Image (cartoon, rainbow, N blue to C red):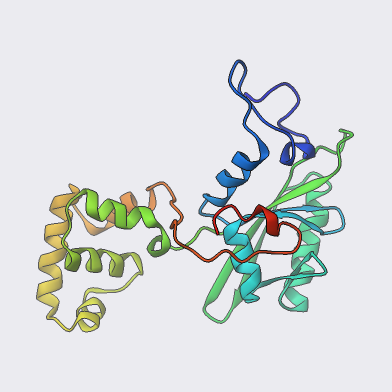
Protein backbone atom coordinates (compact mmCIF):
# COMPACT_ATOMS: atom_id res chain seq x y z
CA UNK A 1 0.00 0.00 0.00
CA UNK A 2 1.00 3.62 -0.46
CA UNK A 3 1.97 5.71 2.50
CA UNK A 4 -0.95 6.36 4.82
CA UNK A 5 -3.55 8.63 3.33
CA UNK A 6 -1.68 9.24 0.07
CA UNK A 7 -3.64 7.07 -2.32
CA UNK A 8 -6.73 9.29 -2.48
CA UNK A 9 -5.26 12.79 -2.43
CA UNK A 10 -5.07 15.06 -5.45
CA UNK A 11 -1.68 16.28 -4.28
CA UNK A 12 -0.30 12.83 -5.09
CA UNK A 13 0.30 14.19 -8.60
CA UNK A 14 2.90 16.48 -7.09
CA UNK A 15 4.04 14.60 -3.98
CA UNK A 16 6.59 11.76 -3.92
CA UNK A 17 5.27 8.26 -3.32
CA UNK A 18 6.87 5.30 -1.61
CA UNK A 19 6.16 1.84 -0.30
CA UNK A 20 6.76 1.57 3.46
CA UNK A 21 10.47 1.29 4.09
CA UNK A 22 11.34 1.92 0.44
CA UNK A 23 12.99 4.95 -1.22
CA UNK A 24 10.66 7.76 -2.21
CA UNK A 25 9.49 7.81 -5.83
CA UNK A 26 9.53 11.40 -7.05
CA UNK A 27 7.06 13.20 -9.31
CA UNK A 28 9.35 12.88 -12.36
CA UNK A 29 9.38 9.08 -12.01
CA UNK A 30 5.61 8.98 -11.65
CA UNK A 31 5.17 11.05 -14.81
CA UNK A 32 7.56 8.74 -16.68
CA UNK A 33 5.40 5.80 -15.60
CA UNK A 34 2.26 7.53 -16.90
CA UNK A 35 3.98 8.20 -20.23
CA UNK A 36 4.74 4.47 -20.60
CA UNK A 37 1.10 3.47 -20.11
CA UNK A 38 -0.58 2.35 -23.36
CA UNK A 39 -3.69 4.35 -22.51
CA UNK A 40 -4.23 8.08 -22.78
CA UNK A 41 -4.42 9.45 -19.23
CA UNK A 42 -5.70 12.89 -18.22
CA UNK A 43 -6.39 14.45 -14.84
CA UNK A 44 -8.89 17.31 -14.73
CA UNK A 45 -10.27 19.55 -12.00
CA UNK A 46 -13.84 20.67 -11.30
CA UNK A 47 -13.63 23.34 -14.01
CA UNK A 48 -12.51 20.81 -16.62
CA UNK A 49 -8.98 22.22 -16.61
CA UNK A 50 -6.37 19.68 -17.66
CA UNK A 51 -3.92 19.26 -14.78
CA UNK A 52 -1.89 16.58 -16.53
CA UNK A 53 -1.94 14.62 -19.78
CA UNK A 54 0.42 11.76 -20.55
CA UNK A 55 2.04 11.22 -23.95
CA UNK A 56 -0.84 9.36 -25.62
CA UNK A 57 -3.41 11.80 -24.27
CA UNK A 58 -1.39 14.73 -25.64
CA UNK A 59 -1.17 12.95 -28.97
CA UNK A 60 -4.96 12.48 -29.07
CA UNK A 61 -5.59 16.11 -28.12
CA UNK A 62 -3.13 17.34 -30.73
CA UNK A 63 -4.91 15.32 -33.43
CA UNK A 64 -8.21 17.07 -32.65
CA UNK A 65 -10.16 14.07 -33.96
CA UNK A 66 -12.35 13.46 -30.92
CA UNK A 67 -10.89 15.55 -28.11
CA UNK A 68 -9.48 19.07 -27.98
CA UNK A 69 -7.92 21.35 -25.41
CA UNK A 70 -9.43 24.83 -25.58
CA UNK A 71 -8.08 27.34 -23.08
CA UNK A 72 -6.50 24.33 -21.35
CA UNK A 73 -9.98 22.83 -20.81
CA UNK A 74 -10.90 19.34 -21.98
CA UNK A 75 -13.63 19.43 -24.64
CA UNK A 76 -15.00 17.21 -27.39
CA UNK A 77 -14.33 18.02 -31.01
CA UNK A 78 -18.02 18.82 -31.44
CA UNK A 79 -20.90 19.98 -29.24
CA UNK A 80 -22.38 16.47 -28.88
CA UNK A 81 -19.10 14.99 -27.63
CA UNK A 82 -18.62 17.91 -25.24
CA UNK A 83 -22.10 17.42 -23.77
CA UNK A 84 -21.49 13.69 -23.19
CA UNK A 85 -18.17 14.39 -21.51
CA UNK A 86 -19.64 17.17 -19.37
CA UNK A 87 -22.36 14.83 -18.09
CA UNK A 88 -19.77 12.16 -17.25
CA UNK A 89 -17.54 14.74 -15.56
CA UNK A 90 -20.37 16.01 -13.36
CA UNK A 91 -21.24 12.43 -12.37
CA UNK A 92 -17.58 11.75 -11.51
CA UNK A 93 -17.48 14.76 -9.22
CA UNK A 94 -20.49 13.25 -7.44
CA UNK A 95 -18.42 10.13 -6.86
CA UNK A 96 -19.83 8.08 -9.77
CA UNK A 97 -17.84 6.36 -12.51
CA UNK A 98 -18.95 6.88 -16.09
CA UNK A 99 -18.03 5.51 -19.52
CA UNK A 100 -18.40 7.69 -22.63
CA UNK A 101 -18.38 6.17 -26.12
CA UNK A 102 -17.50 8.54 -28.96
CA UNK A 103 -17.89 7.61 -32.62
CA UNK A 104 -16.86 9.59 -35.66
CA UNK A 105 -16.96 7.70 -38.95
CA UNK A 106 -14.84 4.57 -38.48
CA UNK A 107 -13.01 6.12 -35.55
CA UNK A 108 -14.07 5.10 -32.03
CA UNK A 109 -12.82 6.36 -28.71
CA UNK A 110 -14.03 5.40 -25.24
CA UNK A 111 -13.33 7.43 -22.12
CA UNK A 112 -13.64 6.27 -18.51
CA UNK A 113 -14.26 9.04 -15.97
CA UNK A 114 -13.15 8.02 -12.47
CA UNK A 115 -13.29 10.22 -9.35
CA UNK A 116 -9.91 10.57 -7.65
CA UNK A 117 -11.39 12.14 -4.53
CA UNK A 118 -14.27 11.28 -2.23
CA UNK A 119 -17.16 13.70 -1.64
CA UNK A 120 -16.60 13.42 2.13
CA UNK A 121 -12.90 14.20 1.94
CA UNK A 122 -11.42 17.68 2.06
CA UNK A 123 -8.99 17.32 -0.84
CA UNK A 124 -9.36 19.27 -4.08
CA UNK A 125 -11.76 17.35 -6.36
CA UNK A 126 -10.13 15.81 -9.44
CA UNK A 127 -11.17 13.24 -12.03
CA UNK A 128 -9.09 10.67 -13.89
CA UNK A 129 -10.00 10.34 -17.57
CA UNK A 130 -8.63 7.22 -19.23
CA UNK A 131 -8.84 6.79 -23.00
CA UNK A 132 -9.31 3.45 -24.73
CA UNK A 133 -6.20 1.37 -25.27
CA UNK A 134 -4.22 1.60 -28.47
CA UNK A 135 -4.92 -1.12 -31.03
CA UNK A 136 -2.90 -4.31 -30.74
CA UNK A 137 -0.97 -3.32 -33.86
CA UNK A 138 0.32 -0.22 -32.08
CA UNK A 139 1.49 -2.21 -29.07
CA UNK A 140 5.25 -2.62 -29.28
CA UNK A 141 4.92 -5.82 -27.23
CA UNK A 142 3.38 -7.55 -30.27
CA UNK A 143 6.55 -7.08 -32.29
CA UNK A 144 8.63 -8.03 -29.25
CA UNK A 145 6.52 -11.20 -28.95
CA UNK A 146 7.10 -12.00 -32.63
CA UNK A 147 10.85 -11.73 -32.19
CA UNK A 148 10.84 -13.67 -28.91
CA UNK A 149 9.19 -16.70 -30.51
CA UNK A 150 11.38 -16.43 -33.61
CA UNK A 151 8.91 -15.39 -36.31
CA UNK A 152 10.33 -14.54 -39.72
CA UNK A 153 9.59 -11.04 -41.11
CA UNK A 154 6.85 -12.46 -43.35
CA UNK A 155 5.28 -14.39 -40.45
CA UNK A 156 5.40 -11.25 -38.32
CA UNK A 157 3.63 -9.34 -41.10
CA UNK A 158 0.91 -12.00 -41.14
CA UNK A 159 0.56 -11.75 -37.36
CA UNK A 160 0.13 -7.98 -37.62
CA UNK A 161 -2.54 -8.53 -40.28
CA UNK A 162 -4.43 -10.85 -37.94
CA UNK A 163 -4.17 -8.26 -35.17
CA UNK A 164 -5.74 -5.72 -37.53
CA UNK A 165 -8.69 -8.07 -37.97
CA UNK A 166 -7.92 -8.97 -41.58
CA UNK A 167 -9.16 -12.23 -43.11
CA UNK A 168 -6.74 -14.62 -44.82
CA UNK A 169 -7.69 -13.50 -48.38
CA UNK A 170 -7.19 -9.85 -47.36
CA UNK A 171 -3.73 -10.58 -45.93
CA UNK A 172 -2.84 -12.54 -49.04
CA UNK A 173 -3.97 -9.71 -51.34
CA UNK A 174 -2.06 -7.18 -49.27
CA UNK A 175 1.18 -9.13 -49.63
CA UNK A 176 0.61 -10.36 -53.18
CA UNK A 177 0.70 -14.07 -52.35
CA UNK A 178 -1.75 -16.95 -52.52
CA UNK A 179 -4.11 -17.55 -49.56
CA UNK A 180 -2.53 -21.00 -49.18
CA UNK A 181 0.80 -19.30 -48.42
CA UNK A 182 -0.81 -17.26 -45.66
CA UNK A 183 -2.48 -20.37 -44.21
CA UNK A 184 0.91 -22.11 -44.15
CA UNK A 185 2.51 -19.14 -42.41
CA UNK A 186 -0.31 -19.00 -39.86
CA UNK A 187 0.20 -22.71 -39.13
CA UNK A 188 3.92 -22.09 -38.59
CA UNK A 189 3.47 -19.07 -36.36
CA UNK A 190 0.80 -20.90 -34.31
CA UNK A 191 3.27 -23.73 -33.77
CA UNK A 192 6.03 -21.33 -32.77
CA UNK A 193 3.66 -19.58 -30.35
CA UNK A 194 2.31 -22.89 -28.99
CA UNK A 195 -1.27 -21.81 -29.73
CA UNK A 196 -3.76 -24.44 -31.02
CA UNK A 197 -5.88 -21.89 -32.91
CA UNK A 198 -5.89 -18.33 -34.24
CA UNK A 199 -8.41 -17.41 -31.55
CA UNK A 200 -6.08 -18.60 -28.78
CA UNK A 201 -3.16 -16.84 -30.45
CA UNK A 202 -5.02 -13.53 -30.55
CA UNK A 203 -6.05 -14.01 -26.91
CA UNK A 204 -2.37 -14.25 -26.04
CA UNK A 205 -1.66 -11.13 -28.07
CA UNK A 206 -4.41 -9.20 -26.28
CA UNK A 207 -3.00 -10.26 -22.91
CA UNK A 208 0.50 -8.94 -23.63
CA UNK A 209 1.62 -6.06 -21.43
CA UNK A 210 1.06 -2.73 -23.19
CA UNK A 211 4.38 -1.26 -24.33
CA UNK A 212 4.56 2.23 -25.85
CA UNK A 213 7.20 2.63 -28.60
CA UNK A 214 10.27 4.46 -27.29
CA UNK A 215 10.73 6.47 -30.49
CA UNK A 216 7.77 8.79 -30.79
CA UNK A 217 6.88 12.41 -31.27
CA UNK A 218 5.79 14.14 -28.09
CA UNK A 219 2.94 16.61 -28.56
CA UNK A 220 3.59 19.10 -25.73
CA UNK A 221 0.72 21.08 -24.24
CA UNK A 222 0.98 24.47 -22.51
CA UNK A 223 0.08 23.18 -19.07
CA UNK A 224 2.75 20.51 -18.89
CA UNK A 225 5.14 21.04 -21.78
CA UNK A 226 7.98 20.88 -19.28
CA UNK A 227 6.78 17.40 -18.35
CA UNK A 228 7.53 15.92 -21.75
CA UNK A 229 9.66 13.11 -20.43
CA UNK A 230 10.71 11.62 -23.76
CA UNK A 231 11.52 14.26 -26.38
Q: Which quadrant would the N terminus be assigned to in this image?
A: top right
Q: Whole-percent x and y of residue 144?
A: 30, 52
Give the residue at x 21% y 55%: 197
Q: Is residue 124 left or right of residue 26?
A: right
Q: Residue furthest top?
A: 21
The residue lying toward the viewer, choosing from 187 and 225, is: 225
Give the residue at x 61% y 66%: 219
> To which quarter of the image does residue 176 belong?
bottom left
> To which quarter of the image does residue 68 belong?
bottom right
Q: Which quadrant would the C terminus be assigned to in this image?
A: bottom right
Q: Whole-percent x and y of residue 117?
A: 79, 39
> To which quarter of the image does residue 109 belong?
bottom right
Give the residue at x 86% y 42%: 124
Q: Is residue 103 left or right of residue 69?
A: left
Badge count: 0
Q: Is residue 58 above or below residue 126?
A: below
Q: Whole-percent x and y of residue 157?
A: 24, 68
Q: Whole-percent x and y of residue 166?
A: 31, 73
The residue lying toward the viewer, choosing from 147 and 16, is: 16
Amino acid sequence: MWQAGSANRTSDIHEPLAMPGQPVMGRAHLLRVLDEVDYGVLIIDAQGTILHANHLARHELASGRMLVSYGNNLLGSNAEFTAQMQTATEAAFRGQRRLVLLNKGERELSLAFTPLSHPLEADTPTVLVMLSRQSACDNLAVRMFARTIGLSPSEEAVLMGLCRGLEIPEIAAEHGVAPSTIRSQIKTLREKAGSPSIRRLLQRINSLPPVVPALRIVMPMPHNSSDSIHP
